[in-house]
Image (cartoon, rainbow, N blue to C red):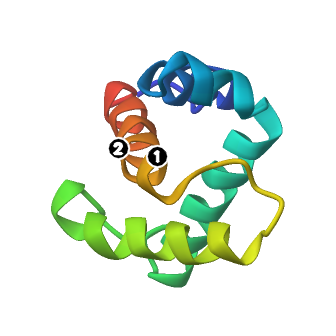
Amino acid sequence: MKEFDEKEAVKAMRQTLPPEASSRCNDDELLNIIDIIWDWYEDQGLLDIDAEADDDDVNVDALVAHVRKMIAKDKLSPIHPDEIEPIVAAELQYEQSLI
């Protein structure tokens, strides 16, 4: 299993965005989404050492809803609500590429 690389995750996320959206979002905003995803994992107990987490354990709909909620709280975020699901999917796909 390869190690998670935030720069590679951001690159994967950026590739899902249309060019105008990609230019609107800086890397810090995409890193914020990664942080939100991993905080959600922790809240769900998916980062516990004894957790045998796999794709089936991740409720993607709940994760996307959580990210949308957290981004909506940030009034300055340039990320539109309809861009969140593909960004989250790209991050999850990147994670799967590490296995």
Which residue corresponds to the image point at 65% horizontal and 66% vertical from the top-left? 71
Residue 91 image position (x, y, % from top left): 45, 39
27 up-or-down from 74: above or below: above
Element assignment for label 1: helix
Task: Report how far apart the C-alphas of labels 1 and 2 lie in the structure.
Answer: 10 Å
| Residue type (three-letter) at the residue carrying disc 2 | Ala
Residue 82 image point, x, y percent: 42, 53
- In this view of the protein, can residue 52 be seen by the observer? yes
Which SS class for mark 2?
helix
Which label number is shown at residue 18? none
Task: Tell me where residue 14 appears, x and y as whole percent.
Answer: 56, 24
| Image depth: mark 1 or mark 2 in front | 1
33, above or below 50, in the image: above
Q: Which residue is mark 1?
A: 83
Report whether 91 appears left or right of 10: left
Q: Amino acid at mark 1?
A: Glu
Mark 2 is surrounded, within 10 Å at the Cα level, by few (under 14), some (14 to 19) or many (20 or more) other residues, namely some
Question: Along the line of sight, which residue is nearer the eye, 89 or 22?
Answer: 22
Tell me which residue sits at (53%, 67%) in the image. Answer: 67
- In percent of the image, x 39 and y 35: which residue is there? 90
Where is mark 2, residue-wise? 89
